[in-house]
Each structure stands twice: as C-alpha cells, then as structure tokens.
Image (cartoon, helix red, strand yellow):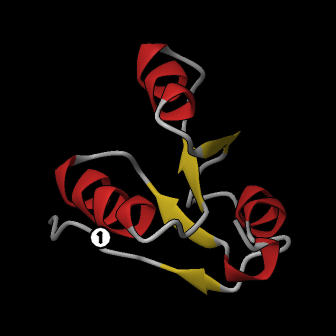
Amino acid sequence: MVANNLVLIPGAGGVGRTVFEHLRAQDVPVRFMVRREDERAAELRALGAEVVIGDLTRPETVAAALQGVARMYFGMRVSP
C-alpha cells in the first residue's frame, strides 16, 4: 500500500463500509475516524483499515485524523 494514497472515511456506517470495500479491493489504504473504541473499530482493523478516534464536531480530532491523508470520503446524513 502506498501511504500518500491514504483515504480518510469519517464514520463506519453502511455507505462508508461499502466505499471501504471498493477501495480495499484496489489495495488503497483506508483510515476510518470513529467516535469510540469498540467492537466495530476492532472489526475495521481486522479488515485492514487504520482506525483513529475522533469526532467531526471537534476540529482538533479532524485535523489529527487528516494527517498524511491524500483524500477524504465525506457523506453526511441529512438531519434536522
């Protein structure tokens, strides 16, 4: 995997997981930003993703998660 090709996916929901599967099939390195260390984070690591803990409402965690990232997939749900 080429480090400068790293893609950040904030959130590990359905669409993010599908994007991850497509990227990994092409051997593109992926980093997920998740809100907490839990079973889902462990599962993502087992699937070959790098996982960092962060929150989109906290700019300092987003900035840290973006270190070394070339691209970011961002698909935010519509909410009131």
Question: Is residue 17 rendered to the left or right of residue 10?
Answer: left
Q: Which residue is mark 1?
A: 76
Q: Residue at x 75, y 71 (%)?
A: 66
Find the residue positioned furthest to the top.
39
Above or below, 27 relative to 47 = below
Q: x, y percentage for residue 79?
A: 16, 64
Q: Nearer the viewer, residue 61 or 2?
A: 2
Label 1, secondary structure: give it.
Answer: loop
Q: Residue at x 20, y 60 (%)?
A: 15
In the picture, which quadrant includes the C terminus? bottom left
Amino acid on which the number 1 mark rests in the picture: Met
Q: Nearer the viewer, residue 20 or 32?
A: 20
Q: x, y percentage for residue 44?
A: 47, 34
The mark tally for this picture is 1
Q: Residue at x 31, y 56 (%)?
A: 21
Q: Nearer the viewer, residue 32 or 62?
A: 32
